[in-house]
Image (cartoon, helix red, strand yellow):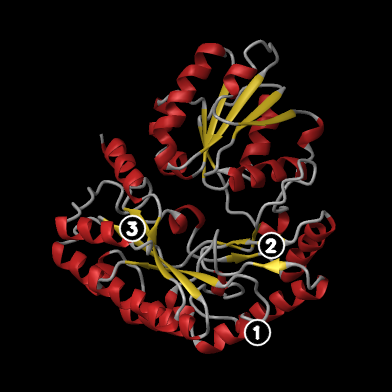
Amino acid sequence: MRVIFNENIYNKYSISALISALEHKGLLEDIEVIIEDSDFFKEFKSHRDKVIFCFSFCSPQKCNVFDSLRKLKENYPEAIFIAGGPHPSGDPEDTLKAGFDYVLVGEGENTLPKLLKTLHTSEVKSKIINGDRVDINNFPPWSEKFHRLSPIEITRGCPYACKFCQTSFLFGTKPRHRSIENIIEYVEKFYKNGKRDLRFITPNALSYGSPDGKTINLQLIERLLKSIREISESIRIFFGTFPSEVRPEFINKEVLQLIKPYIFNKTLTIGAQTGSDSLLLKINRGHTIDEVYYAVDNATECGFSVNVDFIFGFPEETEKDQIETINFIDRLISLGDKRNVSVKIHAHHFMPLPGTPFHNKKPAKLSEKLTRYLGRLYNRKKIFGDLYKQILFCKRLIK
C-alpha cells in the first residue's frame, strides 16, 4: 500500500508530525510512504498499487487542493483520499463535498495511523473522524527515518481564543508542553545529525511551562535554554521568532535580559494585530496597544529588532480603527529609528477561517488612506508579507 503525502511550504511541519506518528506506531514497515509536491499525480500515473493520498491544508490552500483533488481522482478512480489540517477540521462537510473520502478533525497523531491500519485490510464506515488531544511528549517531533529534522513543537494549545484564529478551537485552551527532558532528547539527535539552527513551534514562546498559558514560568524557560546550550555552544537557538512568536504582555526587561545570552536571533516577532484598543476587545485579543508599545520599547532598548504582526480588514473594523492603527505603527517604527534597530510590520489580511467565531464574517474594506499608507511603508521597506495575495485569497474563499 502506498501512502502519498501532498507537501508544500505551508504544511511541511504538519507532514513531519504525521509521518513521525506513523513511524512511532510502527506502520512504516507495512506501508510505503511517499512525500511529493502538488504535481505528484503525474509521476505516479502508471502504478497499480493501492494508493492513499493524504492532504493537510489551511483555508488559503483550499482552492488549489480541491483543483488537485479533481485531477487525481481522474487518474486514480480507485484511490482513497484523506484530508486533515485546519480547514478540514473547521469545515469537514465542505471537505467531504469536494470529494475526499475521509476527513480527520483535530489532531491526527492517533487517528491517521489507526485509519491507515484499518484501510490496509478493510473499509471504514465513518467519513468524519474526530481526533483526540494527545500528549505531545508521547510523539517524536520528526521522523528519523525520513531525516526530517523540523522545528520542535514545545507547546500545543492557546488559552486566548482570539476570534479570528483557529489555534484555540483546534487544539484547546489548555496548553500542553513538551517536557525539557523530552526536548533535550531530540536536540541531542538534532545535533548529532549535523544540524545547528534550532527552532521551535509554539503559539507563544514565552508561555513555555506555564500551567495556564497566561503567566511566565521564567525559571523553566531559563532551564530549557541553559540545557540546550550545555549540549553544545555551536547550537544556534532561535526563540521568539519564526515559526513562533511572543505575545506583547509577556515581554519585559527581566525576560529579555534572561533570554538574550542564550539565543542567536537578534529579531523578535510580536503579535499586535491592530493599533485600535476597541478592535482588540472585539477580536478578544487579550492585551492593549500600550502593552504592545511597552514590549517593542523594551525589545528595541535591549538591542533587538522587532517584526510586529498586524492583520488588516477585520470584521467591523472602521476607518477610525484604521487611522488609529496608522498612528500606532508610526509610533512603533519611530522607536526603531530612534535606537538604530529595525522595527518592521508583518502585514496580513483577515481570513474568515472555519471553526472560528469569525468564520461567517466578511472583511472590512481597507480605506484609501490606509492603502496609500501601506504603499508608502513598502516603499520605505518597513513592511513585508503577503498582504495583497491574501486579499485575493480572501475574495476567492468568500466567493
Residue 378, numbered label: 3
Instruction: Tell me the crowding category of disc 3: few under 14, some 14 to 19, or many 20 or more residues within 10 angstroms, Cα based.
Output: some
Q: Quadrant of residue 312?
A: bottom left
Q: Can residue 287 be seen in the rendering of this structure?
A: no
50 up-or-down from 255: above or below: above
Tell me the amino acid under the disc marked 3. Answer: Tyr
Q: Which residue is mark 2?
A: 198
Q: Residue at x 43, y 55 (%)?
A: 169
Residue 385 x %, y %: 40, 54
Residue for badge 1: 219
Tell me the tag on residue 292: none
Upstream in the sequence, badge 3 or badge 2? 2
Q: Is residue 159 left or right of residue 238?
A: left
Q: CA distance from mark 3 to mark 2?
A: 30 Å
Residue closest to the eye, 16 or 167: 16
* Residue 357 lies in quadrant: bottom left
Q: Mark 3 or mark 1, which is nearer to you?
A: 3
Task: Work out how far the residue at label 1 is from the one at label 2, CA to CA, in angstroms.
Answer: 20 Å
Q: Are marks 1 and 2 in contact (CB under 8 Å)?
A: no
Give the residue furthest to the bottom. 254
Locate residue 334, reporting x and y percent: 34, 78
Please say if 44 is above or below 372. above
Q: Is residue 97 above or below residue 74?
A: below
Instruction: State the image coordinates of residue 20 (x, y, percent, origin top left).
Output: 71, 45
Which dot, 1 or 2, sits closer to the camera?
Answer: 2
Question: Quick check: 70 above or below 325?
Answer: above
